[in-house]
Image (cartoon, rainbow, N blue to C red):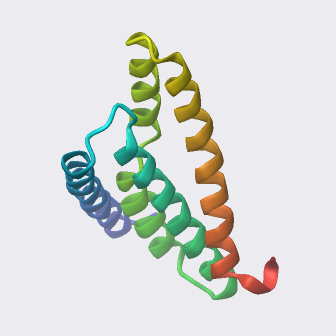
Amino acid sequence: MTVTTTLLVGLSGALGAAARFVLDGLVRSRWPTTIPLATMLINISGAFLLGLLTGLWMAAEVATGWRDVLGVGFLGGYTTFSTAMVETVHLRQHHHAGLAAANLLIMIAACGFAAFLGLGFGAPARF
């Protein structure tokens, strides 16, 4: 780990967080709903992208620094497990227990499947 890599991870994370902020705002304004759709779409797309990049990295020699910059930095800033959990608790606190349970289960299953698909596309010979 170098100072340059650390700075690039931080910058990339900021860009990922900004991308999440913009996409979250667009989805919420376009499709207002009780269900935290924006967070779900962000986490699913992030899981797919990380799976895809991981698959590509498995097939080629990629410097650890770039994996950190894109995986830990950008996609770490882009995705948000903690927001998903707070939104799930918020649903439950507002008497939407069924939606809270569905949000939790769908988020976990869809993100896992998206990561699996990403890996499959990134390294098809391994699947």
- With 126 as the anchor, is 18 left or right in this view? left
> In front here: 126 or 66?
126
- With 124 as the anchor, is 82 left or right in this view? left
Q: Position of residue 121 (x, y in %)?
A: 64, 80
Determine the residue positioned at 48% across, 64% down.
71
> In front here: 97 or 80?
97
Q: Position of residue 16 (x, y in %)?
A: 31, 59
Q: Position of residue 38 (x, y in %)?
A: 35, 47
Residue 53 in the image: above or below residue 124: above
Determine the residue positioned at 47% across, 60% down.
46
Quarter of the C terminus within the rendering: bottom right
Q: Position of residue 112 (x, y in %)?
A: 65, 53
- With 30 as the anchor, is 64 left or right in this view? right
- With 93 as the anchor, is 124 left or right in this view? right
Residue 14 in the image: above or below residue 64: above
Determine the residue positioned at 22% across, 52% down.
30
Number of on-image labels: 0
Determine the residue positioned at 69% across, 64% down.
116
Residue 113 in the image: above or below residue 60: above
